[in-house]
Image (spheres, helix red, strand yellow):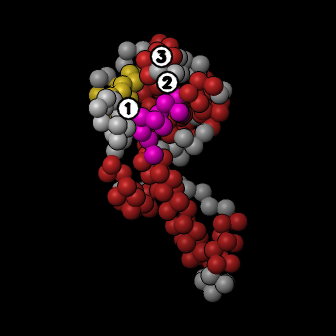
Amino acid sequence: MSWSKLKQHLESFLCPALYGRVEYSSTSYRYLPDKAGLCYITVDKKNVLNMNDITTLIRWYQTELEIKNDSDIQIPINNEEIEAVRKDTKGIVPEDRLKVIARSRKISEYAKELLSAQSSLSKSNFIVVANKFLSISIEESIESNDILLNILALVDRRVGKKRILNMTEKMKLKHPIVQYFYELRLSML
């Protein structure tokens, strides 16, 4: 499907309150075949999500530290994760320290997931994900770990007021840009 047709389909699914505010844009380099074009999502004519940001690869450690130092982020740890740490350390680590190690491991995984999701966004990936969004149910898009699927679902007119209000807890564990679009949609209710 061509970009203009895809854009038209996506914009036809925008909720009425966001129509004209949220736009999907694309640039291509006709004479530079080694450059994959850029895609970005704008809100009120401001570039909010750029699909090709080369600085994301060096931000993993910084993101991990921000997550560790932010007391508002609650990352639940279950007994299986604590047991995995106990097994890895051969039982020589004190009990209270096991929870700290398990939480640290989970935060590290969370930071890696966030940045891998961010850094893999490009025009070609946007087109693939947008086509996937158009072919799967809205529930699958909301439950997905893919940032772009989450964003497309949040601005979709098929997601009603009740569902948006019930997502508050689920959105706390999502990527900050997904939280941004959730807050945007929440403000439109």
Give the spatial CA distance, label 3 vs label 1: 15 Å
Residue denoted by label 1: 39
x, y percent for residue 29: 30, 31
- Which marked residue is nearer to the observer: mark 3 or mark 2? 3
Range of magenta residues: 120-130
Q: Residue 5: give its label.
A: 3
Amino acid type of disc 3?
A: Lys
Q: Looking at the image, is mark 3 or mark 2 earlier in the sequence? A: 3
Q: Is residue 140 above or below residue 8?
A: below
- Which marked residue is nearer to the observer: mark 1 or mark 2? 1
The quarter of the picture where residue 123 lies is top left
Q: Residue 155: give its label.
A: 2
Q: Is residue 46 visible?
A: yes
x, y percent for residue 157: 54, 17
Residue at image coords 42%, 60%:
64
Q: Residue 92: give its label.
A: none
Q: Is residue 50 visible?
A: no
